[in-house]
Image (cartoon, helix red, strand yellow):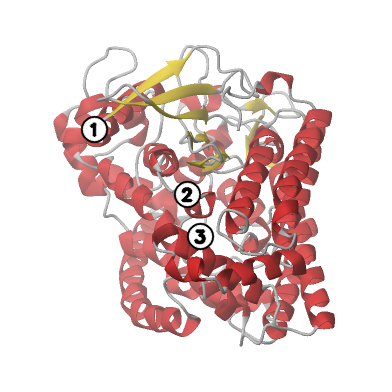
Amino acid sequence: MPAMLYDYRAVTAATVSAEADAAIERANALVAPMVTSHEQPSFADSLLPLELAGAEIGVGYGRGAFMAQVHPQADVRDAAQAADERMTKWRVEIAFRDDVYRAVAAFAATDEAARLTGERALLLEHWLRDFRRAGHELPAEQRSELESLRSRLVELEVAFARNLNEYADWIEVDDEGLDGLPASFVQRLKPGSQPGTYRVSLDYPEVNPFLERATNRHHRETIFRKNWNKAVETNRPLLTEALDVRRRIAKLLDYPTWAHYAMEVKMAANPERVRGFYDALVPPLEAAARREVQLLRDMHVDAGAEDAVQPWDWTFYDTRQSLDVHGVDQNVVSEYLPLDSVLDGMFALTGEVFGLDYQRVPEANAWDPSVQLFRIRDRASGDLIAHFYADLFPREGKFGHAAAFPIIIGHLGADGEYVKPVNAIVANFTPPAGDRPSLLTHGPHGEVETLFHEFGHILHMSLTRAQFTRFSAANTEWDFVEAPSQIMEHWVWEPDVLARFARHYLTGEPIPRELVERMAGSRYLNVGLRAARQVFFGTMDLALHHTTDEPDLDAATRDSWQVTQLPYPEDTFMLAGFGHLMSG
């Protein structure tokens, strides 16, 4: 495994393809000896080569396929998407190989296998489960069909993600259409096609503030509908086919539905438990959302409206409530949250909690000049633990939300040395504009909360000491992956935490304690409605996958939306832009 960090400045479409092919070649070379006949199969010549082969595919992802999410050049992103498809198919196909299955099964029958404990025992258990889910108990014809379906699902998921990352749309407004937005927001907009107009894009540093603050209701509706119709023409048919493929996979493996298949490997275990959870949760949540929507409706009527509060209205009135009820002006709050100060504060806080030191690396050698590179060291020993990249501002064709990506997954290498993790946090925060630095938004799901959430993933991925990539950090049981990040989200609402790093970007004055306390009070405005929105995602996912029949996508979305107590936005199809659903 390479000791030096990769130089991403030299990345081209050709290098991306070459790195993917080389990773697959290295992985195949590791697998080849394990499928030969062994008189006495052992962990070292059966499961360990599979684990190390997966680590090589991970290196290929970090050098190649990851570029699909972040590289500025379209041809590189296209090559990376193709590389991602090839490597993901390799991961799928390895579990379908008869020779690999026979080698692991032979080892599973040995006394050594029976004596395995801890992570090694779990690795064997998971591989045997993978082989069963790859249909090794099925007749050859059905297993061949299953492999074909799994391969097709990879193609659909990769195409869906590519369409979403490449999609771009906007509205054009004049100065009057930007009423309610601060000058700093207007300053960073691109000019429109006509003199005196501006583009407001669907990038979340633009669409979210616009929905929260623009007084022009018609423009809010227009951009909301565009946002809920992202990539609909290309992605709707891909999603429809993917749902069909998933149902066929479940049927071949004798699962009642895809939901049963997917939840078998999760802590929930089966969709009936999830359905019971939602059945208990939804009624009180609907009641809370109903009360909150009525309060928004009162503000709506006071503003002269006669219809119901619509989905493009509620965050606007929520922002108004924050100001009117708690005296919290998010424009003012952001001035105390310059990105560099927030990063320094986050590093100081997590450094104390986990005993870490962070160092910015001057020469990042990254895929874009705006990307920063950091080292993480153990404070007591000074030992290097991990590296991570921070790619925090929007670019054309870049991954459109916020996430943490593995570049090298921490694991025990073939030489017995621990391979140190390298990860990347990718986001689209408010960029600098003119003489103003990047000033982050606060509030529920604001940029500060998002930064802490994603950095929770970075810490989880960096501090792992798992022996095998199969269980390393984000590859652990999926139900747990979000837990560290959700804990860190809460920190950004603690007055003592904010007081550590919130400083005015011009004066350096600390954020007033009284303002921080008002911010904490505003956190629980419309909490029922926010929770209902999250339940909407989950119940919709269940409706689409907990069925043996082809679902009515529009009806499933509309029915699930009812929990919010807001009118459903007809003539939209938000599923086309819902990457989490398509990625499984």
Figure check: 545 above or below 71: below
Q: Residue at x 32, y 21 (%)?
A: 382
Residue 329 horizontal/vertical position (percent): 31, 36
Figure check: 373 above or below 162: above
Figure check: 397 above or below 32: above
Residue closest to the eye, 38 or 332: 38
Residue occupied by mark 1: 498
Residue that extends furthest to the front in the rendered view of this protein: 39
Say if mark 2 contacts mark 3, CB within 8 Å: no
In the drawing, what numbered circle is on residue 311?
3
Residue occupied by mark 2: 472
Amino acid type indicated by mark 3: Pro
Task: Tell me if I can see residue 497 in this picture.
Answer: yes
Q: Residues within 10 Å of mark 1 (few under 14, many from 20)?
A: many
Q: Rounded to the nearest whole Å, what is the CA distance between mark 2 and mark 3?
A: 40 Å
Figure check: 146 above or below 195: below
